């Protein structure tokens, strides 16, 4: 494996449903296989990779909080949803010829090992994709924050955030034809411009730990593989 710092990829749960939405319950097999294949090819080329996957294709905590007697249970549901997605992603990666390990804040027998840095770093060094499920293990934090946390824990050289836009723009490109895409921003510029790169807690942690954030469109075929290459697309925020 290449002697480089690992990368942390943040995927939404919707990435596993495909452009047309899930055809088989909460997943689309073709979408899962496409994502997994590109991940496996990127790792085979030398990238050491951790992944944090969201749970929005199954449930978002904010959707259910209003109907709960204890609102934070909605966050618990959301964290469990990310574990389901982590299992599916592991299955796809193994089906594509790679190896994967599901890691959660706490061990879940036959599903995930509890977070242990020594075990995680050994897996990454061996070319195993480490899929982090279960969020941070605590309510009130988003999967963006979980991604920033895991990126810090594995000393990631970059946090790759797959989104539905191909970078950071000066304005909303969907409504403003004069919007310009920015290739690079400092953390200070991102704050001053109020670009909303990530939620505040996640952004603050990346800034503190000096972990650059790359925003890119993860939807097109080949996008994830390109993001794992030596010349990735999107907007880089850091410095």
Image (cartoon, rainbow, N blue to C red):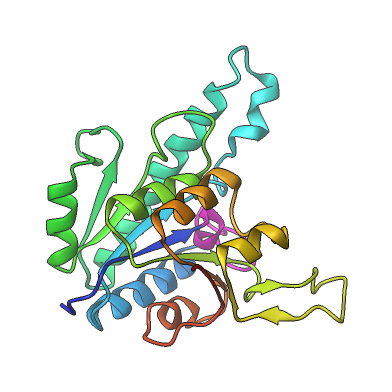
| Residue 12 coordinates in the image, percent (x, y) | 52, 56
Is 70 situated above or below 105? above
Residue pushed farthest top? 69
Find out whether residue 20 is within the magenta segment.
yes
Instruction: Please check the rendered image and state whether residue 214 is part of the magenta-colored stretch, yes or no.
Output: no
Side of 159 where 219 appears, left or right:
right
Residue visible at 31% across and 54% down in the picture: 131
Residue 35, compared with residue 137, is above or below; it is below
The image quadrant of residue 182 is bottom right
- Residue 91 position within the rendered picture, expressed as x and y whole percent measured from the top left: 30, 58
Pick whichever, 227 or 92, lies toward us. 227
Residue 83: percent from left, percent from top: 38, 42
Which residue occupies 40% across, 44% down?
Answer: 84
Report the residue at 72% width, 58% height from top.
194
Q: Is residue 89 visible?
A: yes
- Give the magenta-colored segment's residue range: 12-27
Our reading of the magenta stretch's main secondary structure is loop
Q: Quadrant of the N terminus?
A: bottom left
């Amino acid at each position: 494996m290449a002697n480089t710092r690992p990368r942390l990829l943040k995927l939404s749960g919707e990435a596993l449903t495909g452009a047309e939405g899930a055809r088989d319950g909460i997943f689309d097999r073709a979408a899962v296989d496409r994502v997994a294949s590109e991940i496996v090819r990127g790792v085979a080329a030398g990238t050491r990779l951790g992944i944090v996957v969201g749970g929005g294709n199954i449930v978002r905590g904010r959707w259910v909080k209003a109907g709960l007697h204890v609102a934070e249970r909605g966050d618990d549901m959301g964290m469990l949803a990310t574990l389901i997605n982590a299992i599916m992603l592991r299955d796809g990666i193994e089906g594509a010829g790679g190896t994967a390990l599901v890691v959660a804040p706490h061990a879940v027998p036959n599903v995930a090992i509890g977070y242990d840095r020594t075990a995680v770093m050994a897996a990454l060094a061996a070319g195993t994709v480490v899929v982090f499920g279960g969020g941070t293990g605590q309510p009130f934090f988003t999967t963006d924050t979980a991604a920033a946390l895991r990126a810090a824990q594995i000393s990631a050289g970059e946090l790759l955030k797959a989104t539905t836009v191909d970078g950071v723009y000066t304005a909303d490109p969907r409504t403003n034809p004069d919007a310009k895409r920015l290739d690079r921003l400092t953390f200070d510029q991102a704050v001053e411009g109020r670009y909303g790169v990530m939620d505040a807690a996640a952004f603050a942690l990346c800034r503190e730990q000096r972990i650059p954030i790359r925003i890119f469109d993860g939807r097109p075929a080949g996008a994830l593989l390109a993001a794992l290459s030596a010349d990735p697309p999107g907007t880089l925020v850091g410095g």
